[in-house]
Image (cartoon, rainbow, N blue to C red):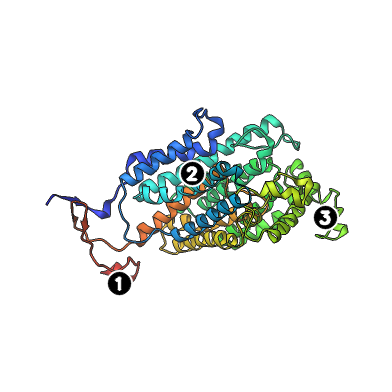
Amino acid sequence: MKTMIVDENHSVTPRSVLYLLAFTIFYIPNQSRIPDIPVPGLNITNLLFLTLLFLVFRNYREDVIKTPLKGNFLFYFSVLAWGLLIGQFYDGSTFLADLQAYKNVTLYMLLFFIAYHGIRDIKALKFLIFVILFVAFFDTYLGLRQAMDYGFNYNESRRVAAPFSWNSTDANRSAAFYVIYMTLMGVTAFFYRDSRLIRWVALGCLAFGIFVNFFTYSRQSYGIFAVLALILTMRRNLLLGLLIVVALLNYHAWLPGSVIARIDMTVQGTGSMPGIVNKPLNQELDPSTESRFVIWQGAAQMLADHPLGVGLDHFSKYIGEYSPEHAHMDAHNYFVLATAENGPLMPLALLGLLFGLFKLGRKIEKIDDRTESKVLGIGLWLGTMAVAMVNFYGSRFADGNLMANFWIFAGLAARYFAIRTQPAQSTSAQIIGEGLTRRRTNLPRYRRSDKLLNA
C-alpha cells in the first residue's frame, strides 16, 4: 500500500492561495481604479473567485471540527433563494437580473469559506490580517487626496467617496467602509500588546482614518464612530472612555467647521412625515433624513400587502406604489430592504448570522491570553457591530466591494479558532493510506489548564 507521511501539527498554507487571497483583498475594494476584462461574465472578480475555489479544493484537508457558522450561512442563502423564487412568481421578466443579484450577494460571502479552508497556519493568517489593515490605510490615503482636491468646505457634490469612485453618490458607502475597517484598526491599536511600534502605527492610522471620514460628510458614520469608540475605549480603559465622552459632548470645540455645519443640518431642514412623527419634529428634520422614514413606512405597507416578500432585488420596483416620490429608490436600511424582499424569515436569518459572528468573536477572545486571540476576537465581534450599525441607515450588507474584506477577516478569525481549539495531535507523524483512510488519535480537546501545562 502506498503511503505518505503527514505531520498535522505543521500544516502550511499553499503560497498560491496566500498570494491570490492577498491580491483579492487589495483588488475588490479598489477595482473601480483598475481596468477590467471587457467580456460579460468574465470579470476579474469572478476569475479570482473561481481560481481560489479551485486551489482550495485541490489542497482541501478535512478538519477535525465542523466549519463554524456553516448552518447560519446556509440558512441565510436559503432565504435569499426563496426571495429569488417568489420574485419570479410576481415578475419573471427579470429572471437573469435577479439571478445575477443572488450571485453577487452570495459570491462575496463565500469568501468566508475560502479564507477558512484556504489558510492553514497562523503565520499566513497574520500576514493576511496585515494586508486587510494595509488596504484600509491605503484607501484612507485615497480619501485624503480627494478631500484635498475638493477642499475642506462642505459641498454636497464634493464629498469623499474613495476607494469606490470620485462620485459623491458613493460618499455614504465610503463612510461605511471606513467605519468597518477603522474599527479593526482601532482594535489592533488598543489590544496588540506584542509590539509597541505596531500599536502606535495602528493608532496613527486610526486617527488618520477618522479624520478623512469627516469629509465623507456622512452623519450616520459620525454617530457610529462615537458609539464604537466608547465601546472600544471603555473595554480598554475606563478613564480613557470618560475622556472620549467629554470630547464628544464638546464636539463644537474641536471638529472642523464644515463637519459641525453638516451635523447641524440634520435638524435644520423642513418637511413633513404624516403619520410618523409629530409636527414640531417634522419642521426640523432635513429632507434626506425625513425621506428615510417615509420609505420605511412604505416598506411596512409593502410587506403587509406581500407577506411572503416581493422578491429578491424587487424593492425598487414596488416602492413607487407606496411612496411615489421615492420610486426606484433603495430602502436605506438593509434590514427593511431584505425583509420586504424575502419575507418574514429574513430577519431570523440575518440576525442569526450576525449573532453567530458576534458569538464566535467572543469565543475567540476568551480562548487564551494570546495577543492574537484578543485582536481577532474583539475585532470580529466589534466589527460585526459596526456592520450591523452601518446597515441601519443604509443597505450595505449585500455590497460586495464593501463587505468582501470583512468576510475574509471573519473567515480568518474562524480559522484561528479552529487552530487553537482543534483536538491535540500526536507528536509523531501520522500514516495515511492512499488518501482514503486516516488514523486519528482520540485525545481530549485542547485546553489551557494547569493540568495540561504542568503535564
Q: Earlier in the sequence, mark 1 or mark 3?
A: 3
Q: Nearer the viewer, mark 2 or mark 3?
A: 3
Q: Which mark is residue 269?
A: none
Q: In the drawing, what numbered circle is on residue 132? A: 2
Q: Residues within 10 Å of mark 3 (few under 14, many from 20)?
A: some
Residue placed at 39% from the left, 54% from the top? Answer: 415
CA separation in Å, label 2 and label 1: 38 Å
Whether residue 23 is visible to the viewer of this picture, yes or no, is no
x, y percent for residue 326: 76, 46
Of the pair 331 and 168, the residue shown nearer to us? 331
Q: Which residue is mark 1?
A: 451
73 and 317: which is toward the camera: 317
**Spatial separation of the CA atoms under disc 1 and disc 3:** 65 Å
Q: What residue appears at the point 76 percent right and 44 percent down from the top-left corner?
A: 262
Res. 325 visible in picture: yes
- The image shows residue 134 at horizontal and vertical percentages of 50, 40
How far apart are labels 2 and 3 at the CA level? 42 Å
Q: What's under tag 3, amino acid-wise? A: Met
| Residue type, mark 2 in image | Ile
Left or right position of 22 against 335: left
Residue closer to the observer: 405 or 236? 405
The answer to whether residue 65 is above or below residue 399 is below
The first of marks 2 and 1 along the sequence is 2
Which residue position is annotated with label 3? 273
Quarter where residue 426 is shown: bottom left
Q: In front of the other: label 2 or label 1?
A: 2
